[in-house]
Amino acid sequence: MGKRAAGKRAAAAPRSSRRRRAGRARGSGGHRSLGRIVLGGLVLGALSLGAGAALAHWEGDGDPTADEGARAAAPDTRGPEGPAATPSPEPGAPTPPSPSPPRSPSVPASGSASAPASAKPPTGSSPPAVPHSGAGTFTTARASGSRAGTGTLRRYRVQVEDGTGLSATDAAREIEQILAHPRGWAAHGRGAFQLVSEDADFVIRIATPRTADRLCLAQGLDTGGELNCETTEGVVVNLKRWMLGSPTFTGTPAEYRHLIINHEVGHEIGIRQHMGCPGPGKPAPVMMQQIKGLKGCVSNAWPYDEDGRYITGPIVP
């Protein structure tokens, strides 16, 4: 009995040994399978990461050449001299004021190229104040000019009553331009004129209404504080007419000054009689006393029209 147990144990021993070897064999095989799984997972992960990086690079960067081309094709919205972008101010810093747009340059109004006193008052403004009387003394313009026109030369000087605020030199230059105008006497052979400061053949005086009345009355002419006149010494211009023009004249005071000079100098060159209106709607002759009424004519400041025709009318007895 004991032998059988021992035999059995002996016989059983190899089976147990085989089980342990089989167990070890099975355990070794399991480790190898797990290693293959882990290795496969690592390889798969590496491939996935590589593919993802490649995909991200393809979607994010794209073709660098095409991107540069797109940037080159994009228009630059800044001007060639446009300002750089202004950085955002720091918190709490004062906001700089916005730059004001540049002012447009002012465009001067068209009109006579005369002295500042020639400007017509702007619409809605008050006319310049004209003194009724002055000192009774005169300042001679220290100016001279070149000869204008053909024919008999007449030299003239210009004087302005003291205290009027009018520049004698500016007035002289304006009168010089009037007498040299292409529609004036000189341009059509009716005489030549030259501005001088001394040794003049006649004098053009601009005087306050009271002084003008006194000078004209000395020649027997009643100007009533409103009119101009021609004397043995030359021309007396009422400052009121020089500065304000005439209520019957449709142009500016600067244009009316052409009429004053052309009318009075017309007397100087020998036209002693006044003229009337040649017909309704026609330009009034400069030798017409337009301040007394136009009689249907249109006010006019020049002896000749734009075609060089002399503007005349019936003689007023």
Image (cartoon, grey):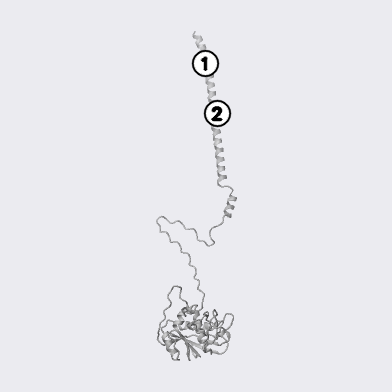
Element class at badge 1: helix
Distance from disc 2 to disc 1, alpha carbons, whole Å, reads 30 Å
Residue 244 location (% of width, % of height) = 45, 79
Q: Where is residue 298 drawn, in percent x and y? A: 52, 79
Q: Which mark is residue 13?
A: 1
Residue 267 position in % (x across, y down):
51, 88
Q: What residue is shown at x 42% (from left), y 89% (from top)?
A: 214
Q: Nearer the viewer, residue 289 or 200?
A: 289
Q: Nearer the viewer, residue 270 or 299?
A: 299
Q: Residue at x 43, y 90 (%)?
A: 217
Q: Position of residue 64 (x, y in %)?
A: 58, 49
Q: Amino acid at mark 1?
A: Ala
Identify residue for label 2.
33
What amino acid type should be assigned to the residue bearing mark 2? Ser
Residue closer to the observer: 88 or 274? 274
Up/down of 273 relative to 20, above or below: below
